[in-house]
Amino acid sequence: MTPRHHIPDDLLVGYAAGTVSEAVSLLVASHLALCPDCRSRCARLESIGGAVLESVTPTAVSPDALSTMLAMLDTPAPPPPPRPVLPAAFADLNLPGPLRDYVARSGQTDWDTLIPGTLHQVTLPVSINDTPVRLTRMRGGFKVPQHTHTGRELNLVLTGGFHDRGEGFGPGDISDRSADVTHALHIDPGEPCVLLAVNTHPLVPVGVLANIAKWLVGF
Ligand SMILES: [Zn+2]
């Protein structure tokens, strides 16, 4: 898997600085797990941030700060928590680690069905501006109704692929659509497409068919 569409610069800088929301952090961390190029970019940003911190004029600390820190270093770190076991319905997705933890914590043991055989989702225990973050699975060949947004739409492809406004997206790719874009995703024929979908604000359907679809699937 070699992603062709990477994390936008503003999100990667925010991630490295720790200023992005939990939802965006999940999206970025999941892509980083799949993309060596972005891991290198992120490491460079973090080293720049470290150099900036080192250049800051030092301030006085308490006299016992050193002994406290050394004591902390001598304290063995607690063992990492056991990795959650995914329900069988998600076991074959080969999810990146950060996303796997969220799916496990969702408490869902299977996909929610919105359109039988076509559209399924898992609502993750994280949201942004009251808009839930979801894992979405769509059958090959499905066309997501045309819509626009009141915010930014970010998708990370996990399996399968789709086309949008002439661009193709496959496993590991991130699509980034701003609030002023009206578009429709065309899922590639073949295997189902599974996306991590992060919308910073609710979608706005366009046209009669989209309104029907909204009533059906509630997005
Ligand atoms: Zn990347």
Image (cartoon, helix red, strand yellow):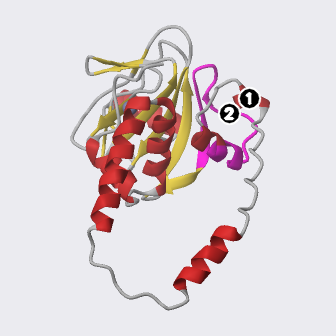
Indicate the quadrant where residue 194 lies: top right
Could you tell me which residue is drawn at 38 percent across and 50 percent down?
200
Query: Would residue 26 be counted in the magenta stretch?
Result: no
Front-lying residue, 44 or 142: 44
In the picture of the structure, the residue carrying the numbered disc 1 is 89
Q: Position of residue 125 (x, y in %)?
A: 61, 52
Front-lying residue, 14 or 118: 14
- Could you tell whether 38 is left or right of 22 in the image? left
- Range drawn in magenta: 101-124
| Residue 139 visible in the snapshot | yes
Q: Position of residue 103 (x, y in %)?
A: 65, 42
Residue type at tag 1: Ala
Count of marks overlaid on the render: 2
Q: In what element is the residue under mark 1?
A: helix
Q: Which dot marks residue 172?
A: none
Q: Quadrant of ligand 1?
A: top left
Could you tell me which residue is drawn at 64 percent across and 27 percent down?
94
- Could you tell whether 155 is left or right of 5 in the image? right
In the picture of the structure, the residue carrying the numbered disc 2 is 111
Could you tell me which residue is drawn at 63 percent across and 19 percent down?
117
